[in-house]
Amino acid sequence: MDGLAGGSSDSTLSYQLAYLSNDQDRQRGGGGIREFDEVVVTALRFAPTLPESPSFVTMIGSTRLNLGVSSSLAGAIASVPGIHIKDYGGTSGLKTISQRGLGAEHTLVLLNGMRVSSFQNGLVDLGLFPIGEIERIEVLHGGQSAVHGSDAIGGVVNLVTRPQTEPISAALESAFGSFGYQRIKASGGALWGDFGVRASLANERSTEDYPFLFHNGPSVEEVTRTNADFSARYGTLETFADLGPDSRLISFARAYQSDRGVGGSVLSPSSSSNARQDDEDYILQLSLRSGLGGNRVLTVGAQVHSAYQRYQDPDLRAAQAAGLDTWFKNNDHRGSVSLFTPLFDDIDITLGGELAATTASGTSMAEKFTRWHGSSFLAGKASILREQSVLKELVVYPSLRVDGFTGVSPSLSPQLALMLKFEGLNPASTDPLEPYLRASASKNFRVPTFNELYYQGGGGIGNPLLKPEYSRGFEVGGGISGSLLGRHVVDLMYFETKMTDRIVWVAAGNFGVTPRNIRSVNSTGFEVSWNWKPDNGPVSLLLGYTNLSSLKTSRETPEDPNVNTSLVYIPGETASASLDWIIPVETIGIRTLEGEVAYNYVGLRYTSEDNEGSLPAYQLVDLGLLINWGLNSWHIGTKLDVLNVFDADYQVILGYPMPMRSFRLTFSLGY
């Protein structure tokens, strides 16, 4: 019962880590970040419920992913408070993340808790992560280097894959849409005693010849996007084997290949591009999770990650007479171990370490480089006060991590977080409204990328003397969870991040540009989210709002006039709202009528460092409608998605037009 036709249950380890099943989730009318029951957040070193997490966490579950109109990671997390997606247009356009007003390189992306962010350029193209095999997405807000090391300055996004949980399943899915979009996917799996396997294979393509409006002063002309086609092939294979009552061995493999046109910036109605890009990404993971008795849990993991990218532009002849043709390849091998153990009744610790070797090669590098990385960490949880008048509990979460990289000074990352839980405001209720407060302070870092250290291509040269970027951050806030005319979870968090030694590419004579540690940035703001599920109702509501200021606070040359100016392409305000419904029908073969209306507002963004140029705010409304049919054990899904319902004319990045209204129809058959 895969895909749209039913979904699958969340994974459950034999030592029972309180996951919700997808069926329970649907019965509650919840889904995604509307899941209010206890859910393990595996990107944290401990497993608290979401309202009791020491960090502000957003969970997007499988039901929410099925209802959402996007088939990629970018669209799935676009409405999360504090996140802005920098989108270069259409299915083929680059999509990167900005979290809490920082760069794409300052959010760490994990797959099943293991790093997949690129050490080559620090970026993750979110458009290259299809979500069809993702069970849930965990977004940790704020600095997390004390737990996850480099790059986790703005936060962490962890993708958790979908395991096999049913005796046998099979599904076929086909989608068609505007601008030549097509997708076909087959998946299935089975359980044999203590062994399970699940596999999927998909092909996705689109011509992306969408119309847009080109503005030239007072005149407006309709133009068609060219050279933005997209084609991808990808597959997954996941297995598990229970080795005993408290141990599970899991393997996961992913292969992804794509080729696409790079449409380039549109500067006039006749702008054209012939650039092409090929991407390949292969991941193999192994993990062993074992209960050792006494509530102790040992986790051992290993990953091999190979990434290849080739960019060709026959029209760019400044570097080569025949045009630009450049490629890079990374091979990343890493292993990790962690042990969770209670020390006393009110104190738990997790300790562990990681060892990795990453090799980089390519036409824009002078030679092949290998960088070793070693780290160790200790994370604790201590309940130091209980039942003190109105204070129900005070929990302290100290963490400390040390990271060492070849050629880079070691980095020490401490963090201290507090969680205060108070007595319920309506104690007579079986589910009282319980207020809580959170606060944390942390030191975080980002190690320079291979491009920043060793690049030697046309127009630039790397700097092997670069230091890591460092930041100090704190956040304080709170919320309330419980029942009052329905189930509520409200969160409010104020944050501040001060970054020094930020790496900027600057002019370097005949070399073109070179990177230096010369920028300071101060990012402050607050995030608000409200989840509400009415009692016995088929609907659920989510509201989110972010207000932030991300400023460049340093001069990069003595004559630099741009001090205390806003960073480019960072919106000062974002807001989102979504209304979901899951209505049981159980008649004439229809089982449920489901859907979602999603609204997103993105405020003004500056396009130049002097803040003289800007792009206006825009608003988007998306709609998804799903009918789940059924006949005995067979399930049929019919889903209609309408993106940009009101045909908004907008750009996220200057010169990169976005598609206007589009449609997508998906059919699925599952057993």
Image: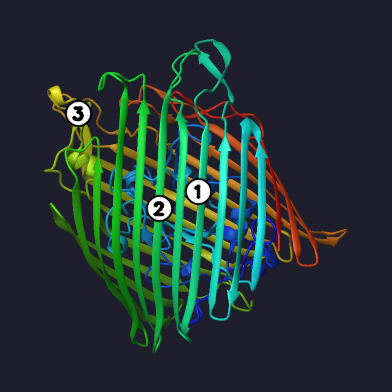
Q: CA distance from mark 3 to mark 2?
A: 32 Å
Q: Quadrant of the N terminus?
A: bottom right
List the residue tagged with mark 1.
73
- Helix, strand or loop for disc 1: helix
Residue 396 position within the rendered picture, expressed as x and y whole percent measured from the top left: 33, 73
Type of amino acid under label 1: Leu
For label 2, the residue is 282
Q: Quadrant of the C terminus?
A: bottom right
Q: Which residue is mark 3?
A: 513
Disc 3 and disc 1 in contact, CB within 8 angstroms: no
Q: How busy is the neighbourhood of tag 1: few (under 14 within 10 Å), some, or many (20 plus)?
A: many
Give the answer, above or below, for where 658 lies relative to 439: above
- N-term mark: 3 or 2: 2
Looking at the rendered structure, the kind of residue marked 2 is Tyr
Residue at (52%, 70%) from the top-left corner? 39
Q: How many marks?
A: 3
Q: Which mark is on residue 12?
A: none
